[in-house]
Amino acid sequence: MLRQRHESRQRAIEAVAEPIVQPAGWYPAAKRWSDVTIASILLIVLSPLLALVAVLIKLDTRGPVFFAQERVGARRRTDADGAVDWEIKPFSMLKFRSMVANADQSLHESHIRAFVSGTLDLEDEETTIKLHDDPRITRVGKWIRRTSVDELPQLINVVKGEMSLVGPRPVPLYEVEGYQPRHYERLHAIPGITGMWQVEGRGQVTFEEMVGMDIWYVRNASFWLDLKIIAQTIPAVLRGEGAA
């Protein structure tokens, strides 16, 4: 386990020195087709669970069932010469509401800003990119976060083309405000529900390591790598290591 984690971190660090190579050929079209197909099937199959969670949220606290937060996404563009470019495009990412209605976002903002700046104490095993012991979280919210059920509405974002099943995690605008120019390459892909650092970083990585893992994915993305990440996501969710 420690060796695998060391190799993942080393690969992330080395990624920033490699030339940019964008996926080409049939991969982008196959990725989009599989995203729409799998997300649509999951929305149908999981509809009873989605309905149950919605009812539990309404019974637990007042407020909307869903929480929509503006996150930074991207849209792939190809010019007449076949060159690939990425347009940064904010979108509303959906989650089941796990906090009290109209919760103050300043607590999470300060946590993420500390993570980006490198001042978050990741040597403490209880400290991760995810904010623990958050007083804003409801009783139902604790359960849906622990099981990652709160992320399921993002299947709608996938169907709409705003997200993919696999890709760099879409981040809040206040995180991107702290980026250096070298960090922006992690945005050169459609953001995903799960991704490289969620399954390999296990929450205990620095910001630079997280960005490095995402950049490595951007430069090496393939259909088979996506399948591998999806397969690794299942045990990660069972261990309670959900997305952020």
Image (cartoon, grey):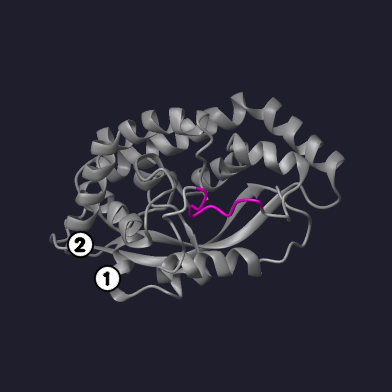
Of the residues shown, which amino acid type is indicated by label 2? Val
Q: Quadrant of residue 189?
A: bottom left
Q: How far apart in space, not on screen, are marks 1 and 2 (Cα)?
A: 8 Å
- In depth, the one of 86 and 153 nearer the eye is 153
Element under label 1? Answer: helix
Which residue matches tag 2? 16
The residue that appears at 28% across and 38% down in the rendered structure is 2
Determine contact: label 1, label 2, CB under 8 Å.
yes
**Residue 104: percent from the left, percent from the top?**
72, 66
Instruction: Give the position of the N terminus as an image quadrant.
Output: top left
The residue that appears at 58% across and 68% down in the rendered structure is 109
The residue carrying pointer 2 sits among few (fewer than 14), some (14 to 19) or many (20 or more) residues within 10 Å by Cα, namely some
Q: Is residue 81 above or below residue 5?
A: below
Label tally = 2
Confirm whether the magenta stretch covers residue 146: no
Q: Bounds of the magenta span? A: 126-133
Mark identifier at residue 182: 1
Q: Is residue 107 above or below residue 99?
A: below
**Residue 223: percent from the left, percent from the top?**
27, 36
Q: Is residue 155 above or below residue 232?
A: below
